[in-house]
Image (spheres, rainbow, N blue to C red):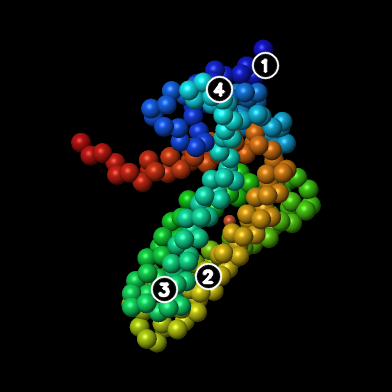
Amino acid sequence: MDNPRPPPEAFGVRGRDIGATMSAIVLRQNAPAWTVGAMAQPGDARPSGLTVAVSGRLIEESPMTATDIFRKNHRTIRKALVSLDRALLMQSPNWAIIAKNLAGYLEIELREYWGSEERWIFKPLAETGPDGAGVVAQMEREHRDLDARLNEFKALTRGPIGAEIAPLVREKGVALVKEFLHHMFLEEEVGFTLAEERLGQTYLEEAADRVLLLKEAEKGLEEPAAID
Ligand SMILES: [Fe+2]
């Protein structure tokens, strides 16, 4: 038989947390044809999601998709950007330290997820037609522009921020926040929405697995090596 469906335990539990005290049986219905290392193709049939039996009650749960993960990342980044904007505009006493710390934080956050976004969402979306390719070209252009702006801001905040460069740091910081927020808005409202329509739930769920695996692998690499 081609691509036999794996046992339910092969999928594990994802989606919203289920209390440890609850006895939950998780079954994924109509799972796609699945082989080790194979990805679902964009546009594959949408599965019915998870059916969770909790205390005899059946609840439909949707597994997490790659766009869910990226939207969640955006929420975290948006909070950091709002803190930066507030510190710059209100000129709080420690604004220079906040600017320095947030420049470093944003760089780490971006390094972690921009590559995944481009690989698992942009690339397949660009292949769905000229309109998808147009949206992707714009989002990629914005990644490059933001990368350049962030590098510039990091360089400006690297050393002591004296009175002579303070206005420039504020100006560049406020512009960075504005562009960043605009970019995330475009991705969520246009790019991710189009990807959800075009690529299909099955593809996006499996892409989520890849994104999470990569995150785990990167975490492992960051941990210090054991010394005998
Ligand atoms: Fe992005």
Q: Do residues under tags 3 and 1 come within 8 Å of each other at their CB atoms? A: no
Q: Nearer the viewer, mark 1 or mark 4?
A: 4
Residue identifier under label 2 = 176
Q: Nearer the viewer, mark 1 or mark 2?
A: 2
What type is the residue that disc 1 sits on? Answer: Asp
Residue identifier under label 3 = 87
Spatial CA distance of label 3 from label 1 is 59 Å
- When the figure is inspected, residue 25 is found, relative to residue 96, above or below; the finding is above
Mark 1 Cβ inside 8 Å of ligand 1: no
Spatial CA distance of label 1 from label 4 is 21 Å
Please report whichever mark, 3 or 1, sits nearer to the chain's N-terminal start. Answer: 1
Q: Position of residue 207 (x, y in %)?
A: 58, 38
Please report whichever mark, 4 or 3, sits nearer to the chain's N-terminal start. Answer: 4
Q: Quadrant of residue 29?
A: top right
Please report whichever mark, 3 or 2, sits nearer to the chain's N-terminal start. Answer: 3
> Which mark is on residue 196?
none
Q: Nearer the viewer, mark 4 or mark 2?
A: 4
- Residue 36 is at least partly visible in this image: no
Residue identifier under label 1 = 2
Identify which residue, 52 or 155, lies in the foreground: 52
